[in-house]
Image (cartoon, rainbow, N blue to C red):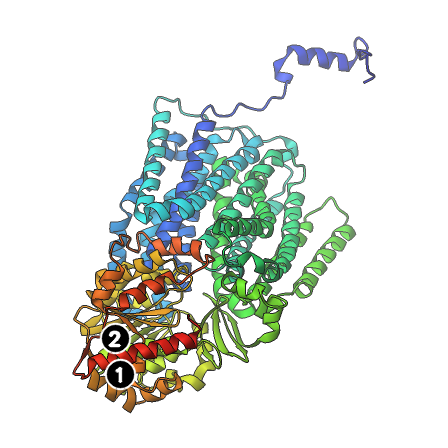
Amino acid sequence: MTKGRKPKPPAEGSSGAKDRILTAVDPSKISLPPRRNDLYAFTAALFTLSGACGLIYQVIWSRLIVLVFGSATHAISTVLGVFFLGLALGSYLAGKNNERFKSPLLFYGLLELGIGIYALLFNPILDLAQYAHHGVFPLLFDSPMALTMARVAIAGLVLLPPTVLMGATVPVVGDFLTRSPDYVGRDYGLIFSLNTFGAAAGSFVSAFFLIPSLGLQATLWIAAAINLGIGVASIWAARGRPLPKKAVSQPSVENSTVTRVEAYACLAAFAVTGFLGLLYEVSWSRALILVFGTSVYAFATMLTTYLIGLALGSMVMGKFVDRIKSPVKAFAAVQLIVGVAVFVSTVAIGMLPDQLVGLFRMDTSWRTVTLVEFIICFGIMFIPAFGSGMLFPLVTRIFMGQRKFNIGRTIADSYAVNTLGCIAGSFVAGFALIPLIGIEMTLLLGAAANMMVAAWLTAFFTEWAAKKRFAAITVIIALAITGVFAMRSWRPLAMNSGIYVYGDALSNMESGVKTFVDSYKMLFYREGPSATVAVVESPRGRFLRVNGKTDGGAVKMGRSDDLTQSFLGLLPLLYLPEAEDALVIGLGTGMTLNAALSNDRTRVDCIEISPAVAEAAAYFKDVTDDAMDSPRVTLKLLDGRTWLDAMPRAYDIIISEPSHPWQTGNANLFTDDFFKASIKRLKEGGVFCQWLPYYRMDEEHFKTLIKTMHLTFPYVNVWVVNTDALVIGSKDPLSLDWPSIKAMSFDTSAKDILGHLGIETFPQLMSFFYLDTPGVDALIKGVSMVNSDDHPIIEYSAPKYLLAKQHGEAFLAILEESKSSRPPLINATALDQLEEIRLTERWKYFEKWGFK
């Protein structure tokens, strides 16, 4: 229009003039969208809160059931699979029967009330499940398939009722708030995104605030109270409200052009997308813990990031989806973009150790590390998650015609199909692809699969000429195959350099991570179902690494872990030389197991959760005398805590040798509940031995763990080796019989082990003793916290101090109380002289270790 000039009206009598006049006076000619439900904002807000509660339930219920089944990958996957199955089943059933719901808002309120009530009753129900599991475990522990099926049945009985209710809320709310078939994409896109934003908030708030501050049970009650509030509010809003009329309008012609074959092709592709989404989540988690570590915050960061991307994708696509003329093309384009993004991000993951090594220097604040981890996760996950989120409103729009424009049924079926794909993706990634081809190749094949889906959907672009379609498909497939082979870039040694714990040392090397890679040789590498395990060797020695962190080794020079590993097996025998039955939780290099066999009468059950660690232990046979092949050893690839809880076996000695207590999974072996389970399995006069590091541990947290163990074991002694405390506990008074110790330590195979460690005299051996029971009482005086399953203080607090500079506060506190502590020796003479020599030998070790 020319500035300052009025538009020229159409000639009188023309059709344009008639249309304009008619439009001006006839409202039926005005195309206005139907009004949104007047309770849209109210219900959407409730559904957002419901999403937060759902994620909190998933986190807490999974943790609690894993405490029953164990932290083994099969057990965790069983819980996750049943949870998703319930969501899919609930969505399907609600969609199939949605015509029966005369008042969707009232029904939604009842669903939320049911979820809240079940959450309040969850603990008693879980107790029954634990009782059932304890009944079947002793019968089936040697049959993994049968045990898994039993666990699926038990988990189903516990988790299916609430998760079916959760899954049913999705189509019920979607049907209630969607205006008409013409606006299903926009309305459902927004509803789904708000619910997912709620889930992201639930993930973040529960991990970073609620559970650390209040514990699991209180957090569960808060979520239950919110659910009950949602239910009451929904029922109140539905009272006296006229029953809604179901939309019977058909969508406009331009939005009904998707054929039946195309619609079902997109639905199948949506299932594949769910499969790939969980495949990526599992693979990203396994890859990024090599960089970030296995803290609970690392996992929460990844999950929160993915959910935010999913929510934003759904929200953005929802704004445009109802105006897209070719939704199948849009679906294919999203798949193509996601595939390319995963290819690029996989290469980026391989570069992280070199780029982030400086981040993990000592004294870097935990908040800084967490913020950077969020940024990295967004860079890697955001585009694939955003693309996956875009597909929810898009597929609903595409598939609506196949359900006769029944909005609730359309939402239900698409959501259920995608969720079933998620279940398959989780299992296939964890149990098949990663163990067989590795994390990197799993990601690359996933990216190629996304592009293959795009190529497959391109075949349905019937408006394109056949040659054009063939050319496009050929190019996409060629790029996908090329990407799988050309984008491989990870260096296993670099990925397992453990920058999250060794960042300071690596940063001080001449070329950082590259120096580490050049200095070490990889002898063994396995990306197993539960952990990445490596055996590396350098001139300094041979080391076992689990998820990048050294968990043991045979050292030729410098400070050695050999003392700690061997002492864990020897010390309990000093207290109980006549022990016949021993349990070792955690195989590691096998040195502890070998030391426990130094008494010829002792039979040992060794429980190791990781099959890859059991394989790696073979590389330490030269220092363990082939301990695993001893006829007195029974090795079980199971969760140690589950074994203690569910197996009715009693032991003279129990040795717990997990990794650091801040690590998720291992943290379950440092709680009050674990110690109670252990003491129940000790025979009369039995001895329990716990490895407890004081390095990278705040003094208060270290004392909290000592107190937690002492609450269960009335009698406690503490030995110190290098930067490790070895804590002995018993329900009976502890004593060290000098003649028996002499006979066992210096007249049996233990003599060779001690000789290898440079210990040739009794005073040298006793120099590692620091605290008797009164000394332990003095050490923990004033400590009020207890580390428990319900309030896992260490798991949530210790990671914040991982990079804090330590000045040996915990050791100095032990040393101070050791001045008045004496080994509980009996049948020994010249104790004063022995004490003087013992302390002299201790000082020699201080000098040897570099302490001043």
The residue identified by callout 1 is 602
Which x, y percent locates residue 353? 58, 62
Q: Quadrant of the N terminus?
A: top right
- Left or right: where 122 falls relative to 270: left
Which x, y percent locates residue 179? 52, 28
Q: Residue at x 47, y 44 (%)?
A: 200
Q: Please tell me whether mark 1 sits on a helix, a strand or a loop.
A: loop
Q: Is residue 505 visible?
A: yes
What mark, if any, has residue 460 been given in the picture? Answer: none
- Left or right: where 538 falls relative to 639: right
The three-letter amino acid code for the residue at tag 1 is Thr
The image shows residue 34, relative to residue 60, as above or below, that is above
Q: Closest to the observer: 702 or 89?
A: 702
Q: Quadrant of the C terminus?
A: bottom left
Number of marks in the rendered image: 2
- Left or right: where 256 falls relative to 826: right
Q: CA distance from mark 2 to mark 1?
A: 10 Å
Q: Closest to the observer: 122 or 736?
A: 736
Sequence-wise, the earlier of marks 2 and 1 is 1
Q: Is residue 604 visible?
A: no
Hey, which residue is sitting farthest top in the picture?
Answer: 12
What mark, if any, has residue 653 been given in the picture? Answer: 2
Which x, y percent locates residue 278? 51, 54
Hey, which residue is sitting farthest bottom in the picture?
Answer: 747
Q: Closest to the observer: 458 or 140?
A: 140
Q: Residue at x 26, y 52 (%)?
A: 784
Q: Closest to the observer: 667 or 641?
A: 667
Q: Are marks 2 and 1 in contact (CB under 8 Å)?
A: yes
The three-letter amino acid code for the residue at tag 2 is Ile
